[in-house]
Amino acid sequence: MLLIAYGISFVCAMLLMAALFLYFRKRFRARVVSLFMLAAFFFLGAYTFKMAIAFWIRVSNISGGDAVNTALMSMSWAVAQTGTTLGLVILTLLMYTRRQDLFMVIPTALLKEENCDVDA
């Protein structure tokens, strides 16, 4: 049952990430991005990574694992948890300081430099 819940969470998070990617693509073209949405995207990315690690840990427990695999899972879980926590802290700070409406304007010069790199 837990594997099914992890799988559903992972698929839903991936679908949300894809939708947000399309949203950010439009916003970057418009050169204005909401910092709150950017923080939410970071949190969702960390959460998706965490669900993939949780699924990997559960499947490895069923099939058995070695010491190296266990250490790698432990380190991966720590990175995923740190990213999720950092995302939650950023979202909480933005929410409680009432900064949900902060936007970042991307300078035109920065976009021109990126386009020059692509053309080269």
Image (cartoon, grey):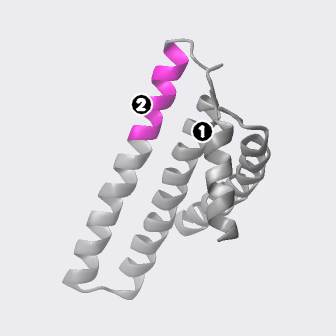
The residue stretch that appears in magenta: 86-96
Q: How many marks?
A: 2
Determine which quarter of the picture holds residue 120: bottom right
Q: Residues within 10 Å of mark 2 (few under 14, many from 20)?
A: some
Q: Residue at x 45, y 21 (%)?
A: 93
Of marks 1 and 2, the one in the foreground: 1
Mark 1 / mark 2, whichever is N-terminal: 1
Q: Which residue is mark 1?
A: 38
Secondary element under disc 1, as helix, strand or loop, is helix
Q: Is residue 84 left or right of residue 68?
A: right
Q: Which mark is residue 22?
A: none
The residues tagged by marks 1 and 2 sit, at their Cα atoms, a distance apart of 13 Å
Above/below status of 48 relative to 67: above
* Quadrant in which the N terminus appears: bottom right
Q: Nearer the viewer, residue 34 or 50?
A: 34
Amino acid found under the numbered disc labelled 2:
Val
Q: Residue furthest left?
A: 67
Instruction: Estimate the x, y position of residue 79 in percent, counting from the top left.
Output: 34, 56
